[in-house]
Amino acid sequence: MRRLFPVTYETAAQASTEAPGAEVTEVTEREWELGELARTYAYPEVREPWLRANMVSTLDGAAHHDGRSQPISSATDMRIFGVLRGLADVVVVGAQTVRQEGYRPARAREAFAGLREAAGQAPAPAIAVVTAALDLDFSLPLFTSPLVPTLVLTGAAAAPDRIAAAERAGARVVIAGDGAGVDPARAVRALGELGHTRLLTEGGPRLLGQWIAAGVLDELCLTLAPMLAAGDAQRIAGGPSMPVPQRFELASLLEEAGFLYCRYRRS
């Protein structure tokens, strides 16, 4: 497990005094380079689709404030957000999150151009929107002018007129369920069949809860913000509970200004 702690040397020394023998692999005061972050968050070398989630939470479990994640985020959180997108084949997101967060197409980033080309990836990840009703504004740039065509994941019972509207806008509709909704395991397989094995989901909470309940989530990248929000905001995952809590193991941990950037993998 790799630990990076960008804290002052004085703080690191205090921590060492308070916890004799505690291991600190690296202490640094500089900004993490994109290459370092790319290596830390690299996908495992597997042939099957690997589904990673990226979420942010306050200390008291709120996944957003006033309906948006930005107020509980940070500059470094957004930097890691960009790295995770730079490594992914496709970003899977729920329709509600697309509407609330004002999603736009993923952009090509020069810093990742060589890495993506070497991996046989498109210049930018595709956005895949999970929706049963296709209640989306298909005139938005997400559908009309992406660098890579946007995918719409839906069920076989979706309204034909809405499917036609998505296709007219330039989106590629992928059927991943027998009813109106999307089956998570089938969605993962369908994306894999399209050549997308490095999967990233950015939620929202209801969608992530469905991935977890279906047992298809392989990794969770969680930013823990040093904030308290109270209120009735959702947790990072909602919906049906697991019969038995699923155990994940810590793969890496970064800290900056009280924010913890945790990466957990399925045990």
Image: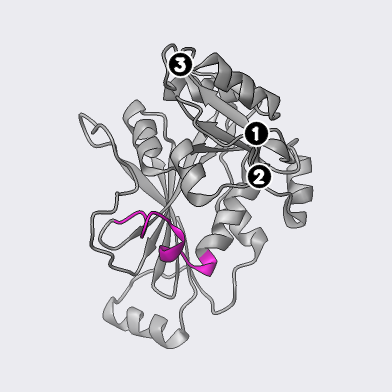
| Count of marks, rendered view | 3
Q: Are marks 3 and 2 in contact (CB under 8 Å)?
A: no
Q: Residue at x 41, y 68 (%)?
A: 259
Question: Which residue, given by chain and number where applicable, does mark 1 sit on?
Answer: 150
SS under mark 2: loop
At a point 66% along the width and 40% down the height, the residue shown is 125
Q: Secondary structure at mark 1?
A: loop
Q: Are marks 1 and 2 in contact (CB under 8 Å)?
A: yes
Residues at marks 3 and 1, CA–CA distance in whole angstroms: 18 Å
What's the amino acid at mark 3?
Gly
Looking at the picture, does residue 121 appear above or below residue 257?
Answer: above
Q: Could you tell me residue 227's position as x and y percent?
A: 32, 69
Q: Is residue 162 above or below residue 92?
A: above
Name the residue carrying label 2.
105
Residue at which label 3 appears: 177
Amino acid type, callout 2 = Pro
